[in-house]
Image: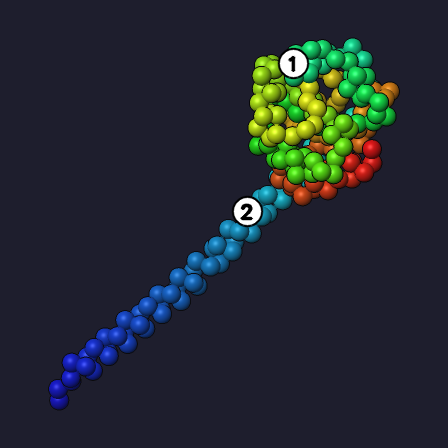
Amino acid sequence: MKISGCKIEKLNYFWITLLFVMISILIFYFCTPQQINKDENSKSSASDVLLRNMSLLKPFELQSEGYELKPDIKVFDEAGMQVSLHNILGDNSSILVYRFSEMHCDICIEQHLSILKNLDTKINSEKLVLLGSYANLKKIKIVRQTHKFNFRIYNTMDDLGIPLEQVNNPYFFILDKDLKCHSFFAAIKENPDLTVSCVQILIKKY
């Protein structure tokens, strides 16, 4: 009994289709659980890093609460002119300070400055001060040029003495007219949503 060419083509098509389906099932069966596990491990790893960083920073936040800055700390504006901490406060009873340094993670600083830029319509530009520590003052100017914000920015190479300075992480705090610091928040890049929420709370607070 002869099988027509048409039937042979149909059989070949059937077996090729069946083979394709079986391969797809095998790929799905073996690869999907691995991808799920990979994603879960990635999320777990990120959560572990976040928890570890928060656990490390919290004691320093608490130790820093109520710290009083020395009035003779040398602070310079973008033009290189020295200004006093009291002049930074101006007529404000308190200001929000973002503290960062060239020793800190660049990605962290970029993230925090972007968050502040996005919140600039909700922040009184006179009540937010960026206080950096860069050996080269030109880098402070580059920070402004890069992000194009309206906030005041200063530079200091003095040790502020705040306990949080011991930790290699940028942070926010409120500085009052008596040069006392409070409401510290060390921002962590692994949780930008928390940074946004805390900055908004601090904005309302001062």
Instruction: Tell me which label, 2 or 1, sits earlier in the chain.
Output: 2
Work out whether 33 lies above or below 77.
below
Residue at point 58% right, 14% down? 136
Q: Position of residue 141 (x, y in %)?
A: 60, 20
Q: Quadrant of the C terminus?
A: top right
Q: Position of residue 92 (x, y in %)?
A: 84, 25
Which numbered tag is attached to residue 103? none
Q: According to the image, label 1 marks what residue?
A: 79
Q: Nearer the viewer, residue 171 or 14?
A: 171
Q: Secondary structure at mark 1?
A: loop
Q: Nearer the viewer, residue 127 or 5?
A: 127
Q: Position of residue 144 (x, y in %)?
A: 61, 25
Decide: few, some or many residues near mark 1? Use Cα within 10 Å; few <14, some 14-19, many ≥20: few
Residue 139 placement: quadrant: top right
Residue 87 placement: quadrant: top right
Of labels 2 and 1, the one closer to you: 1
Name the amino acid type tagged 1. Answer: Ala
Distance of label 2 from label 1 (alpha carbons): 45 Å
Q: Secondary structure at mark 2?
A: helix
Work out whether 202 lies above or below 36.
above
Q: Position of residue 127 (x, y in %)?
A: 77, 28
Q: According to the image, label 2 marks what residue?
A: 42
